[in-house]
Amino acid sequence: MKNIFLLIFFILSAHFLMAQSNSSKANSSLRIEMLFPEGKSKALILSYDDGPDADRKLVKLMNDYGLKGTFHLNSNKLNTKGYLTSEEIKSLFKGHEVSVHTANHPGLSGLLKIDIVYEVVEDRKSLEKLTGNMVIGMAYPFGSYNDLVVETVNGLGIEYARTVADSYNFSIPSNFLKWDPSIHQFGKAYFKPNDAENDKKELASFYKLTDDFLKTTSLALFDVWGHSWENNGEGNRWVEMENFFKLVSKRNDINYTTQITLVDYINAYKNLKFSVDKNIVSNLSSIDVYIKIDDKTYKIPAGSQISI
Ligand SMILES: [Zn+2]
């Protein structure tokens, strides 16, 4: 009888030890973090609306500083006073993203479903014809949306839609169809006419957030939005714009990206496949994906599998 107890004790002990050694091999505690394209820890999106003719000056400035823009256009406004022409869209936005802002710029949350469909599909169709590219990004006119709008645009092939609700942070939105940007260009400076005190305060908070972004060592997405026509207002706003571009450009830790390129990248990251012990990672997408494990960066090339 004593021998039987001894045997059971040994079996249980062996079982316990095996479980211990297996758990030390299981990598459930291994923290895998996403990095941005090119293995960068920061990404910058510059998101501009409406397609006014001042976009010409803004694109030139972005090109001069090696920055990328995402431009949300209203196709039915092109060729009218103060807006871009259809003919220039393809060449002007080369290297940047052209995206939906609806055909006529109505507040979508006040529309019937059929009108939302028309506004989005019509804009997509026109912009795709002008650019020769797929147009699947969007910014809501006036930032106006509700559940019906989100559900409808989701069914129309739109991959992300930006709002105008500043988050004042650098996080990646959990729902791409309710994408709150970090901050409006220059915060809410110049929103009220002739309020120099408010302008000063808002500019200071804008540059504080910019500085926080440049200094952080955490994963950070800075998404700045605005309208190029705003820079034609009083004061030195174009000079201010260039100052901002000087601050954020040509930095090794920032990935300069369009919004749709980043969405594609994040989707590729989310679709990585891992073995149970996380020693094998497979990337079936056509995009190189970068991850960080214990401060070490790994590149998982497009369409390949690596051992970690
Ligand atoms: Zn707009």
Image (cartoon, rainbow, N blue to C red):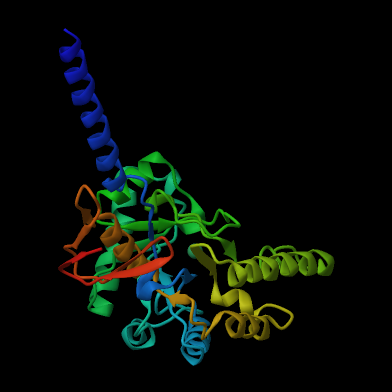
Q: Nearer the viewer, residue 48 or 242?
A: 242
Q: Position of residue 85 (x, y in %)?
A: 39, 83
Q: Quadrant of residue 162?
A: bottom left
* Above or below for 287 versus 140: below
Image quadrant containing the N terminus: top left
| Left or right: residue 195 compared with residue 206 | right
* Above or below for 13 versus 79: above
Q: Which of 39 and 191 is in front in this view?
A: 39
Q: State whether residue 279 appears in this view.
A: yes
* Above or below for 13 versus 146: above
Q: Position of residue 76 (x, y in %)?
A: 37, 69
As drawn, which residue projects farthest toward the right? 197
Q: Which of 165 and 194 is in front in this view?
A: 165
Image quadrant containing the C terminus: bottom left
Q: State whether residue 185 appears in this view.
A: no
* Above or below for 23 versus 213: above
Determine the residue positioned at 29% across, 60% down.
269
Q: In which quarter of the image is residue 291?
A: bottom left
Q: How many marks?
A: 0
As drawn, which residue projects farthest toward the bottom? 64
Q: Nearer the viewer, residue 292 or 158?
A: 292
Q: Where is residue 233 in the image (x, y as percent from the top left)?
A: 68, 77
| Left or right: residue 233 compared with residue 58 | right
As drawn, which residue projects farthest toward the front? 2
Q: Where is residue 253 in the image (x, y as percent from the top left)?
A: 49, 76
| Left or right: residue 290 compared with residue 209 | left
